[in-house]
Amino acid sequence: MLKNNLFETLQKVREVKPLVHNITNVVVTNFTANGLLALGASPVMANAAEEAGDMARIASSLVLNIGTLNSQTVDSMILAGKAANEQGIPVIFDPVGAGATPYRTETAQRIMRELRVSIIRGNAAEIANVVGEKWEIKGVDAGSTNGNITDLAMTAAEKLNCIVVITGKEDVVTNGSTTYVVANGHPLLTKVTGTGCLLTSVIGAFTGVEKDLLQASVAAVSIYGIAAEKAAELTVESGPGSFQIEFLNQLSKVAADDINLYSSIKKLTGG
Ligand code: ATP
Ligand code: TZP
Ligand code: MG
Ligand code: MG
């Protein structure tokens, strides 16, 4: 994937300011809205069943996140997802904590069954549990993983018939046949809650301007990791609090030169 394509896609986000409809969790709502604004997108959070379908219909993309799920928000997710599907609006799903409790696992599987999800993004254990493999998970955090993450991502993409993004030290992005590994990011991202959730919404923003959803996902994951690397350079001595704020600053500042210097994208499989 060409580095100047990455920057062009980012510039499109900044110009178009795609409306990203999020039905997300109460932990990360504010951080997600601020992160999307910093990136250049336009966030909206709308959970009520009375309006979820209407909001999804006017959005560029719909992001569903089960981090603090309850039966009402799950109903709203299904309503919004069906509305988005009818209009051909991409649905991006974050199965937060799938595998931690039966309710989360079953809800994640229900969403994948009842909706046409374009992209699913999670840690390795979450994605494994969505496809019925019982990898260890600790609450919402990935457990220790011995499994092959690339194989897991490719199998999941085939089973779920969507793009799969598995994040961790390295991120794997695949549609089942073409697979990329992105090595951007910084360990400080694991010390701030919601950095996975925000990434899922950032992928949503990129799908609002790039119709090739695999390219959109790779661009989002790499640019997000670059912003984190730059933020870490400035705050690693101070710690996660300073990093969280600087990360928002850097999301708003990623430039063509940063992409040329920092982006680390390898194509593993596919033409
Ligand atoms: P978890 O709860 O298991 O941390 P998550 O949903 O928060 O999962 P992460 O896998 O932490 O999501 O991914 C969020 C961001 O952090 C991604 O950009 C990812 O590349 C980055 N990241 C995670 N771990 C590391 C690491 N050890 N080194 C560099 N970047 C990382
Ligand atoms: N508990 C329920 S949702 C949530 C927590 C801590 C946030 C998880 O965010 P992320 O992005 O998966 O770290
Ligand atoms: Mg994390
Ligand atoms: Mg997560």
Image (cartoon, rainbow, N blue to C red):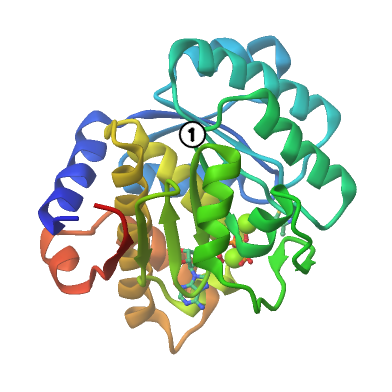
Q: Quadrant of residue 26?
A: top right
The residue lying toward the viewer, choosing from 211 and 80, is 211
- Give the x, y percent position of residue 56: 52, 18
Q: Quadrant of the N terminus?
A: bottom left
Q: Answer left or right for 73 relative to 127.
A: right
Counting labels gives 1
Where disc 1 sits, the SS reads loop
The residue lying toward the viewer, choosing from 168 and 152, is 152
- Give the x, y percent position of residue 199: 47, 52
Furthest-bottom residue in view?
237
Note whether 38 is above or below 205 in the view shown: below
- Say whether residue 165 is visible: yes
Note whether 155 is above or below 184 in the view shown: above
Q: Residue at x 75, y 66 (%)?
A: 135
Q: Answer left or right for 123 relative to 267.
A: right
- Say whether residue 31 is visible: no
Give the class, few, some or many, for how many residues have Cα within 10 Å of label 1's Cα (few <14, many ≥20).
Answer: many
Q: Residue at x 60, y 13 (%)?
A: 53
Note whether 82 is above or below 234 in the view shown: above
Q: What residue would you read off at disc 1? A: 118
The residue lying toward the viewer, choosing from 30 and 132, is 132
The residue lying toward the viewer, choosing from 1 and 69, is 1
Furthest-right residue in view?
102
- Give the x, y percent position of residue 246: 39, 67
Q: Residue at x 50, y 55 (%)?
A: 154
Q: Answer left or right for 148 relative to 254.
A: right
Q: Residue at x 52, y 18 (%)?
A: 84
Q: Amino acid at mark 1?
A: Ser
